[in-house]
Amino acid sequence: MTSQLPVARWHELINDPTYADAILDRLVHNAHRLEMTGESMRRLTPVAAA
């Protein structure tokens, strides 16, 4: 599963602490997390002509 929303903000999005905890427990427990930082490469890559 991928998400552009940081895990720290999922509780805010889900808006129910019980559901948020249950979802995060199941998704994050054995997950490999890669949190990216820096600017998006999309902003640095010029748009190709169609």
Image: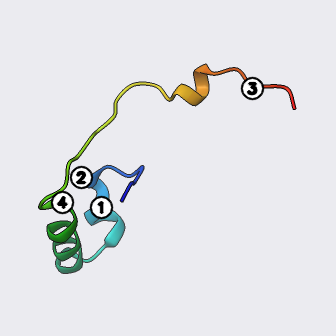
Percent of width and height locating residue 3:
39, 54
Percent of width and height locating residue 13:
36, 65
**Are the residues tagged 1 and 2 within 8 Å (C-beta)?**
yes
Query: Badge 3: few (under 14), some or many (20 or more) residues near its Cα, within 10 Å?
Result: few
Q: Which residue matches tag 1?
A: 10
Q: Earlier in the sequence, mark 3 or mark 1?
A: 1
Which residue is found at the position 39% from the left and 25% from the top? 38
Query: Badge 4: few (under 14), some or many (20 or more) residues near its Cα, within 10 Å?
Result: few
Amino acid bearing label 4: Val
State the quadrant of the C terminus: top right
Q: CA distance from mark 1 to mark 2?
A: 6 Å
Image position of 13 (left or right of 29): right
Amino acid bearing label 1: Trp
In the rendered view, would you say 1 is above or below 6? Answer: below
Q: Quadrant of residue 46?
A: top right
Q: Which residue matches tag 4?
A: 28
Query: Badge 1: few (under 14), some or many (20 or more) residues near its Cα, within 10 Å?
Result: some
Q: Which residue matches tag 2?
A: 8
Q: Earlier in the sequence, mark 4 or mark 2?
A: 2
Q: Nearer the viewer, residue 27 or 6?
A: 27
Q: Nearer the viewer, residue 3 or 30?
A: 30
Closer to viewer: mark 3 or mark 1: 3
Q: Which residue matches tag 3?
A: 47
In terms of secondary structure, where does tag 2 sit?
A: helix
In terms of secondary structure, where does tag 4 sit?
A: helix
